[in-house]
Amino acid sequence: MTTWTPDIALKRGPRYIAIAEAISDAVATGDLAPGERMPTHRDLATRLGVTVGTVTRAYAEAIRRDLITGEVGRGTFVRATPMNFTPLSTRQDDAQPDVFDFAVNLPAQGIAADRLRDTLPRMAAEANPDTLVGYPADSDLEIARRSLASFAEYLGAPFAPERLIVNNGAQNGMLAALLTLCRAGDTVLCDELTYPGMKNLARLLGVRLHGLAMDGHGMTVEALEHAILHHAPRAVYIVPNFQNPTGTIWPRDRREALARLATRHGIWIIEDDVFGFLAEDSERLTPLAALAPERTIYLNSAAKCMGPGLRVGYMIGPTELLPALSAGIRLSTMTPAPLTLQVAVRWIEDGTARDSCRWHRAEARARRNLALQALDGYNVYGDAGSYHLWLTLPEPWRSDEFTRSARHRGIIVSASDHFVLGRRAAPPAVRLGLGGSKSRARIEEGLTRLADMLRAGPVTTFSSIF
Ligand SMILES: Cc1ncc(COP(=O)(O)O)c(C=O)c1O
């Protein structure tokens, strides 16, 4: 019998999970060989200073993970042929230590992954497995609807659950909104720099996006009024909190103006609020869905505040649009995925979702402060709380040239042409996503290098074209 004694001091979460994790590590490294006999529960408990019950739970967990097998009367053994599958990798930037990825617009790796270690075994033990792999029942969707409505209310969007539709993320909601509101050839107004996911959808559906002039706070009311009179739009798409790509918050008076204009001219509003949770509770502005509830489709998701891989989202719409919006979700994705939906619902109920929001608010502020220090003296947009910033490049840098030079130095940023519409000129700017970095230190290092590059300027070249 092995005298294997894992070091679980640094492992987080419940002790039985820590021991199961240690078994998993030891099987992977070969410290526990296939077929080897595990210590008895009492023996391992004594050596680790935990209760026998904890080791019993740990072994049960390891059996569930197919790492070890229990044989009645004989003991517990490392599986002779451990299941061998390659874990999926994530998109966070630690894969190559010399590459700094500021291109992805992800939330930082927060508390969610850690909580999942606890949530999944609980769900496996408590939930009826059929409900996790089948299409969700109406009664389950009703529970999810109520739960997500309570979360929306916490985020400042209080609406009756009957008006909420559960979907597979904000992108899924945007598709359903466009399918509901527009036909090919219709015009939707948006910021002149806008979220590429909306550009892609509009192209797919033949919807014309018309970009409106922005100032340092987003689209202007003058541009909005002018476009409403001259382009007969069906809808306005707006990301009012931490706009993508500029990271700015759309001011209260402009929200009120859009609500008035939409009501007066019978225009729909598609409000994409995936970053709204990053505003402090006391600073969060009233959503358009509350200012013009009969004209607004409000979209939100768990992507940024819990985890993008959950693919859980929701939309709140005017009563008259609900049947068409539901049909849009059904025809595009059938139903939400019950497994991850149950994770999100549990996290809303047990407080994890709020903890995660608070964690991200603090982290986003800390990361932005570091970025502003590193880029001191340069023109950077993005209000406090934003995970992405918009860096206007000093003369003579152009966006594509800067992006290429940065990539040569191992720093990846998003060029402005991803966000402009049609054939408009790409402004000399780049978007910096601060969430994809593994740590704050990586932000400091990567952006300090970027600032050095900005200062040095581009390599001078002379054109040989005449
Ligand atoms: C403005 C905006 N809307 C929607 C999405 C997509 O959200 P989801 O992952 O919930 O589909 C993103 C993702 O980056 C985004 O930036």
Image (cartoon, rainbow, N blue to C red):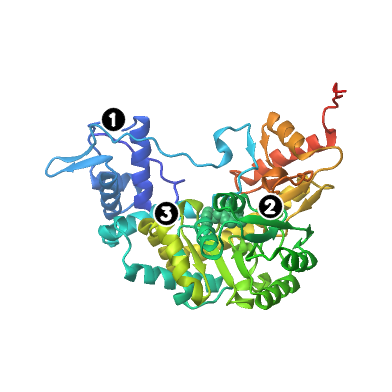
Horizontal and vertical percent for residue 418? Answer: 67, 45
| Screen quadrant of the C terminus | top right
Which label belongs to residue 33? 1
Which label belongs to residue 309? none
User: Identity of the amino acid at label 1?
Assistant: Ala
Q: Residue at x 47, y 63 (%)?
A: 352
User: Identity of the amino acid at label 2?
Assistant: Pro
Q: Residue at x 58, y 60 (%)?
A: 274
| Screen quadrant of the N terminus | top left
The residue indicated by pointer 2 is 245
* Mark 2 residue element: loop
The CA span between labels 1 and 2 is 51 Å
Query: To which quarter of the image does residue 144 belong?
Result: bottom left
Horizontal and vertical percent for residue 84? Answer: 32, 34
Please determine whether, in this image, residue 445 is positioned above or below residue 389.
Answer: above
Horizontal and vertical percent for residue 363? Answer: 62, 55
Image quadrant, ligand 1: bottom right
- Residue farthest along the left direction in this orientation: 73
- Residue farthest along the top direction in this orientation: 464
Residue 150 appearing in the image: no
Earlier in the chain: of badge 3 and badge 2, it is: 3
The residue indicated by pointer 3 is 116
Query: To which quarter of the image does residue 304 belong?
Result: bottom right
